[in-house]
């Protein structure tokens, strides 16, 4: 991930890069995020395609991929591996 200055990321409060993940794909019903360590997270969204790829979010506001129901988890993993990446109708 590109290193950015997150000093003013949230209300002027400094944010450690280890606390954020970057949106890099989406699937039906979720935006898929990855942190610098390669861990996957997701955010349930009715219209995930409206989230811009490259957007960062605090990990504390995301769900680890292992908590997804089996169908959603499969869609997330397919998107993460590049299959149908960035397509909302998986």
Image (cartoon, rainbow, N blue to C red):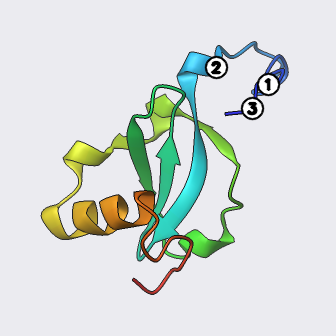
Quadrant position of the C terminus in the picture: bottom left
Residue 40 quadrant: top left
Q: Between disc 3 and disc 1, whose residue precedes?
A: 3
Q: CA distance from mark 1 to mark 2?
A: 16 Å
Residue in view at x 34 percent, y 66 percent: 78
Q: Is residue 8 left or right of residue 32?
A: right
Q: Is residue 36 left or right of residue 9?
A: left
Residue in front for this viewpoint, 15 or 82? 82
User: Which residue is rendered at x = 25% and y = 60% of the image?
Assistant: 73
Question: Comparing marks 1 and 2, which lies closer to the viewer?
Answer: 2
* 18 lies left or right of 70: right
Q: Residue at x 49, y 32 (%)?
A: 59
Residue 46 locus on image (x, y percent): 49, 74
- Residue 19, how many percent across, how many down? 55, 21
In the rendered view, would you say 87 is above or below 75? below
User: Which numbered circle lies on residue 11?
Assistant: 1
Looking at this rendering, what residue extends furthest in the left direction?
70
Does 16 sit above or below residue 39? above
Q: Which residue is mark 3?
A: 2
């Amino acid at each position: 991930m590109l290193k950015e200055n997150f000093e003013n990321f949230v209300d002027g409060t400094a944010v450690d890069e280890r606390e954020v993940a970057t949106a890099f794909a989406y699937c039906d019903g979720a935006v898929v995020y990855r942190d610098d360590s390669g861990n996957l997270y997701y955010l349930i969204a009715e219209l995930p395609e409206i989230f811009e790829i490259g957007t960062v979010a605090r990990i504390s506001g995301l769900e680890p991929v292992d908590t997804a129901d089996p169908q959603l988890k499969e869609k997330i993993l397919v998107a993460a591996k590049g299959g149908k990446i960035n397509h909302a109708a998986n």
